[in-house]
Image (tube, rainbow, N blue to C red):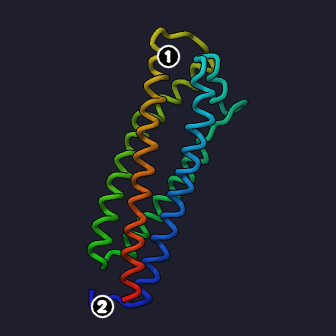
Amino acid sequence: MNDVTTNYLTRAETWLIVTTLFYFLLNGAQIFETVVLVPKWTADPPKTFAILTDKNGASLKTFWILFHSLHEVTFILAIVFCWQLTEVRNWLLMLFTMHFAVRVWTILYFAPTIIGFQNVAETPALDSRLKNKVFLWQKLNYLRVFLFIAVSVGLIPVCMKVFDLKRI
């Protein structure tokens, strides 16, 4: 760490702040969606699934794809710009691994399931297991949002570590 300059620490600090702010922006959107939108479309399936359709509802697919992609780029840049700071790098790699695991879970479970709900909205056919699937999705979503928030909160002490290094 002897070859770490103030300029290096400034770049590390900048990308940590950017990715942390992006994460908190995403958390806000997730909390809004979980508290406001999810209860609406889960209220009376399949009738309430119309909220999910692109043509007359609140499809947030473009928002989530765009902002998660931007955030993941900033997260990777934070790792790159903190690479020489071993302790910070290791924490960032651990947090990114946790983040990545939740994203994979989202892509493998949450996205296909909600797309299935959207398809039911367009061609309503009541599946006897539908309400159970919706209930499970909703409950697991609480856990997913909590995990994303936990990762973003985990970024705060990492930022503080870089701030402290800059003061030395």
* Residue 94: x %, y % from top left: 30, 59
Q: Which quadrant of the figure has residue 109? A: top left
The one nearer the camera, 120 or 142, is 142
- The image shows residue 72, relative to residue 125, as above or below, that is below
At 49% from the left and 70% from the top, the residue drawn is: 17
Q: Compute the Cα span from label 1 to label 2.
A: 59 Å
The one nearer the camera, 25 or 56, is 25
Give the numbered dot on residue 2.
none
Q: What residue is shown with label 2? A: 3
Amino acid at circle 1: Lys
At 40% from the left and 76% from the top, the residue drawn is: 81
Q: On the rendered image, what quadrant is the C terminus found in?
A: bottom left
- The image shows residue 24, relative to residue 159, as above or below, that is above
Q: In this view, does 152 lie to the left or right of 30?
A: left
Give the numbered dot on residue 131.
1
| Identity of the residue furthest to the right in this view | 56
At 45% from the left and 70% from the top, the residue drawn is: 16
Within-10-Å neighbours for mark 1: few <14, some 14–19, many 20+: some
Q: How many numbered markers are drawn?
A: 2
At 58% from the left and 32% from the top, the residue drawn is: 38
